Amino acid sequence: MSPKLSWLVLVAIAVAFFAFDLSRFFTLANLKAQQQAFGIYYTRHAALTFLIYFVIYVAVTALSLPGAAVMTLAGGALFGLGVGTVVVSFASSVGATLAFLVSRFLLHDSVQSKFGDKLTSINEGFRKDGAFYLFSLRLVPIFPFFVINLVMGLTPIRVLVFYIVSQLGMLPGTLVYVNAGTQLAKVDSLQGILSPGLILSFVLLGIFPLVAKTIVSFVKSRRIYAKWPRPKKYDYNLVVIGAGSAGLVASYIAAAVKAKVALIERHKMGGDCLNTGCVPSKALMRSAKMLAYARRAKEFGFRSGTVDYDFKDVMERVQHIIKKVEPHDSVERYTDLGVEVIQAEARITSPFTVEIDGRTLTTRSIVVATGARPLVPPITGLDKIKYLTSDNVWELRNLPKRLVVLGGGPIGAELTQTFARLGSQVTLVEMMDRIMIREDEDVSKLVRKKFEAEGVRILTGHKAKEVRVNGDLKVLICENNAGEVEIEFSEILVAVARVANTKGFGLEELGVTLRRNGTIETNGLLQTNYPKFTAAGMWQVHTSSRT
């Protein structure tokens, strides 16, 4: 059945339910009035009564119609506490699961397609801890069960998990209502069943799973740290390794709340963003954009537009921009903020100690923000030449006449267009069937069309195989479906991806969990398998993006 037809059927059932006033059969007054008749029928037709009751209960809950509370009281009045609890427990769980499936079938895909980007963290939370959340909600009867059923259908929680947790979580509330049903004559209203004290008890039950989870996490944490001797005193509240974007922000915030912070950087303050990434690339792109505007002078009402420039001057301007921004990320500034900046190689020797130049720093917490480096694929002959990456391309002072760019991701794409606008003959080589593979297909097509209009040669579906050098002639050999393609070049820029800097400073020896792509595995709070050991930075996602 299609979703549209399913909607029509559900709406028709709801309209009929209220149009024919079927809700009058699911009232406390009607239950009391018919209690004796129901009892007589049950005495004569026990099995059929069980079946009819079960089917009606499942239908009411599956269709999210009013009446489940009265049906639960009826279960107690008809079957007694023991049998009634069993019947109601299974009927309510089956009905709730059917309502969950209806919500998932009719609403899940449309909600996720419209709001998926905003629900990412929620979805991830339910994949990991959905059972805890559902159990807590089920234990507190003040939350409408039909709302829980429908909302849970929009999450990625598994059907079997939903059913089992619902059966267990609804059991305490079921017992209370079924027991009230056994004393039906004393029940004046549905609201009277739950006293303030009883509601408080359920609330305490509801938060128990979360409290239990916190206790378990605490015990696990103690167990993880048990093999490491704790320092008698700590030199720092926080040690941050890496003075790139993530490390600088972490240090800044910690110092702002008066924590004692050490920031360790082995190379340049500012990391990739300042020195080889965001700042220089945007500065160079701005210069190239000015040239592109000059060539399009007629589009803006000018008869002509020419720019006389020297590539060396353009690259010197890039360095000037870096110097201009540099003070914001400098040792002096962060020292003034209260951060102790240490320029040295760091090695983590325990969850509480970091070694630098033979000196051991003790710390309560550690942030690893060591960044990433360009990934260089194993291409035969590439190591025989001086190839360019996003790290060293800024050293160029002569414009490459023929430039080959390997990789059609964000870095490769932006440098392709930049050098093409500056006057290089650029060939972009991408192994996949389109550039900008992480973007929507229409975006890829638009970018490709623009690049080709600016003179870029784009070879998608081409895998770089070998670099051959014959005197001054350098050739890249690529494979495609038709065979081999030879591309002559004067410079080659490798921009296929970036790889995390996670090796060589103690993570392996410590047993910090790494993902398959080499990045550090963290939870939603960026904690590693050592809770006081945090990892942050662009390298958490294995991508060629700068951000």
Image: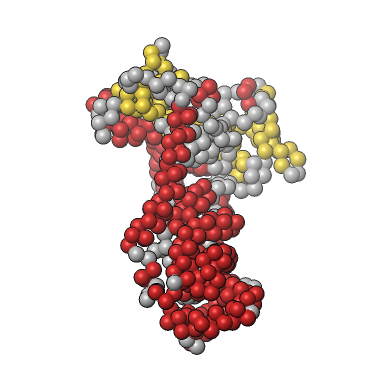
Residue at left offset 68%, top offset 30%? 466
* Looking at the image, residue 542 lies above or below residue 512: below
* Looking at the image, residue 269 lies above or below residue 9: above
Please name the colour scheme applied to the rendered image. Answer: secondary structure
The extreme right residue here reads 483
> Residue 164 at what x, y percent from top left?
57, 56
Residue at left offset 61%, top offset 73%? 50
On-image quarter of the C terminus:
top left
Residue at left offset 68%, top offset 27%? 380
The extreme bottom residue here reads 20
> Residue 28 at what x, y percent from top left?
43, 78
* Looking at the image, residue 476 lies above or below residue 132: above
Residues 513 and 303: in front is 513
Left or right for 432, reference 96: right
Left or right for 428, reference 528: right
* Looking at the image, residue 460 lies above or below residue 75: above
Residues 359 and 444: in front is 359
Residue at left offset 50%, top offset 88%? 20
Give the tally of numbered discs: 0
Residues 502 and 26: in front is 26
